[in-house]
Image (cartoon, rainbow, N blue to C red):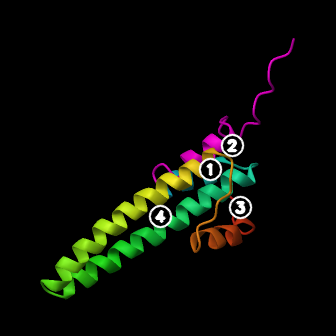
Amino acid sequence: MAGPEPAPSTGTGLAPNVAGALSYLLGPITGVLFLIIEKNSAFVRFHALQSIVFGVIWVIFWIVLSVISGVVPVLGWIVGFLISVVAGLGGLVIWLLLMYKAYQGQEWELPVAGPIARKQMGRVTV
């Protein structure tokens, strides 16, 4: 009696859903790592690219928020603090959702980062 067939592995030796989820773990760092390692799975490469794009957009957002809240005294600090708390929690939820969706085997696209990642899929050859 034969057991269940093993899931197809990726260049990392992991199942594609695990590799896709792990590509979000440390943002652009693990995104670049999985993009370099993975040569075969378009699923993993998409999630790695989306992780990179989302991470870069997130860093730019925080830099702009820091500059704006630093330029406007007192009111800017208060508004900046409130926005950073809400955005931080929102970013955490998005990050966890991206990892969950990848682990479920879904190529869930973020509104801005997803199309950029999808567009770069054909261009990036590592």
- Please report whichever mark, 1 or 4, sits nearer to the chain's N-terminal start: 4
The residue under label 1 is 102
Q: Identify the residue at horizontal 76%, vertical 48% (top origin).
A: 40
Camera-side residue of 89 and 52: 89
Residue 20 magenta-highlighted = yes
Which numbered dot is residue 125? Answer: 3
Dominant SS in magenta? loop
Residue at 62% over, 68% down: 114
Left or right of 19 in this view: 43:
right
Q: Amino acid at mark 1?
A: Ala
Gap between marks 2 and 3 measured at Cα: 19 Å
The spot of residue 19 in percent (x, y) is 62, 43
Q: Secondary structure at mark 1?
A: helix
Q: Amino acid at mark 3?
A: Thr
**Left or right side of 70 for 36:** right
Q: Determine the CA span between mark 1 and mark 2.
A: 9 Å
Name the spot of residue 55 as percent of width and height, x first: 47, 64
Q: Amino acid at mark 2?
A: Pro
* Labels 1 & 4 near each other (Cβ < 8 A): no
Question: The magenta stretch spans which residues?
Answer: 1-26
Which of the marked residues, 4 or 3, is nearer the chain's N terminus? Answer: 4
What kind of residue is marked 4?
Gly
Q: Is 69 on the left or on the right of 29, as rendered?
A: left
Q: Which residue is mark 2?
A: 16
Q: Residue 1, how many percent across, how many down?
A: 87, 11
From the image, state whether disc 4 or disc 3 is nearer to you. 4
Which label sits in the foreground, 1 or 4? 1
Marks 1 and 2, the one that precedes in the sequence: 2
The residue lying at 63 percent from left, 73 percent from top is: 116
Against 51, residue 3 (above or below) is above
Residue to which mark 4 is pinned? 55
